[in-house]
């Protein structure tokens, strides 16, 4: 078959996007280009010229679009000739993809309409209790705090004593003393952090083994050339132990959300199936015990 390519004149399109209307013969169904039986209409490309682009610029955009369209059709034509034997398989995959898109859209509609996105602390705790062995730490986590102050501070011993104290009044004195002297306090007592992150606030050599620090809850200390550091590790979760629930709350919420989505989709499928069975919309011609039956067999009886 001889290849035919026809491209309509664009002279009249100079006015596209300008202050004057297109000539009457340039209507939406005007053919701008044709490759074999495939046609490109003006209505297909009107939107490619942004508002405000006029004159030669608008024509240049149109010409570029038409050129790309023609090249695409040529490649598509050759592909269809070369892979004609695979066309049925391609059509099947396209149809499967179309069906999958529609079903996913239906599932999403059902989920959006019926999902409950609220999860109580009891829901989180119940899942965690049942699955905590599935979540194991691959590195230690700690809770604690660090105070950094200038080397040579005269009340360093008092600061250390206050930091180690368990009484509320002494803890308030510790806070007041740090604020008064503008000491840097890094407080991780309310959240679990990776032990290496905790160490990053100290003059600790990362390549060294710092595990002995985890063996005590007492106030420990370090120094560098300018500063003195007191630090206290109050709680430790070691490698191999279950991940604390505080670190898993967001993950568990996602898991529970996905479970609820699955339950909604399965429930909707069951409703569709039973309704169709009751209304006689389903006929199955294959008995797992006796094998396939002729689809017309039922009608003959």
Image (spheres, rainbow, N blue to C red):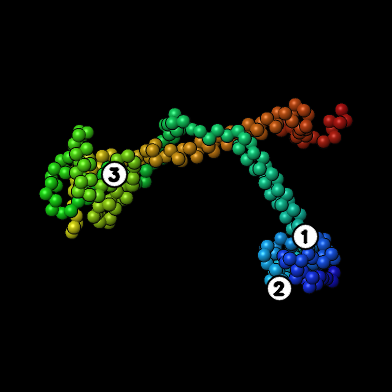
Q: Residue at x 43, y 38 (%)?
A: 249
Name the residue furthest top.
278
The residue to which callout 2 is attached is 56
Question: Which of the 4 image quadrants contains residue 167?
Answer: top left
**Residue 107 at x, y = what percent?**
64, 39
Secondary element at image label 3? strand
What quarter of the picture does the N terminus occupy?
bottom right
SS state under label 2: helix
Q: Residues within 10 Å of mark 3 (few under 14, many from 20)?
A: some
Q: Dot 1, crowdedness within 10 Å: few (<14), some or many (≥20)? A: some
Q: Nearer the viewer, residue 201 or 152?
A: 152
Check the image and name the residue furthest to the left: 154
User: Residue 67: x percent and y percent?
Assistant: 73, 70
Seen in the picture, residue 124 relative to 16 is either above or below; the reply is above
Question: Which one is earlier in the sequence, the residue at label 1 or at label 3?
Answer: 1
Please say if 207 is above or below 96.
below
Of mark 1 and mark 2, the one earlier in the sequence is 1
Q: Residue furthest right?
A: 300
Q: Distance between the residues labelled 1 and 3?
A: 64 Å
- Residue drawn at point x = 62 percent, y = 35 percent: 113
Disc 3 versus disc 2: distance between alpha carbons?
65 Å
On the rendered image, what quadrant is the C terminus found in? top right
Dot 3 corresponds to which residue?
187
Residue 33, how many percent across, how many down? 79, 67
Whether pointer 1 and pointer 3 mark residues with C-beta atoms closer than 8 Å, the reply is: no
Q: Which of the two marks, 3 or 2, is nearer to us in this view?
A: 2
- 55 relative position to 193: left or right: right
The location of residue 2, given as percent across then percent down, is 84, 71
């Amino acid at each position: 078959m001889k290849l035919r390519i026809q491209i309509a004149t664009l002279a009249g399109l100079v006015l596209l996007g300008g202050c004057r209307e297109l000539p009457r013969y340039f209507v939406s169904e005007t053919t701008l280009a044709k490759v074999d039986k495939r046609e490109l209409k003006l209505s297909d490309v009107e939107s490619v010229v942004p508002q405000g682009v006029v004159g030669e610029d608008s024509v240049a955009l149109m010409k570029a679009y038409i050129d790309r369209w023609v090249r695409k059709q040529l490649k598509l034509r050759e592909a269809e000739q070369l892979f004609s034997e695979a066309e049925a398989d391609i059509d099947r995959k396209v149809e499967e993809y179309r069906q999958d898109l529609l079903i996913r859209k239906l599932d999403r509609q059902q989920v959006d309409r019926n999902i409950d996105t609220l999860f109580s602390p009891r829901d989180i705790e119940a899942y965690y209790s049942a699955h905590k062995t599935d979540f194991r730490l691959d590195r230690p986590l700690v809770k604690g705090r660090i105070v950094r102050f200038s080397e040579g501070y005269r009340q360093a011993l008092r600061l250390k004593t206050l930091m180690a104290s368990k009484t509320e009044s002494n803890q308030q004195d510790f806070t007041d003393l740090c604020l008064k002297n503008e000491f840097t306090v890094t407080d991780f007592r309310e959240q679990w952090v990776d032990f290496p992150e905790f160490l990053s606030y100290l003059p600790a050599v990362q390549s060294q083994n710092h595990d002995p620090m985890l063996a005590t809850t007492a106030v420990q200390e370090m120094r560098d050339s300018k500063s003195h550091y007191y630090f206290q590790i109050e709680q430790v979760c070691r490698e191999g132990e279950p991940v604390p629930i505080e670190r898993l709350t967001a993950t568990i919420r996602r898991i529970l959300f996905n479970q609820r989505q699955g339950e909604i989709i399965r429930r909707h499928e069951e409703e569709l199936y039973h309704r169709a069975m009751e209304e006689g919309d389903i006929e199955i011609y294959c008995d797992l015990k006796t094998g396939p039956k002729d689809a017309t067999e039922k009608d003959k009886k």
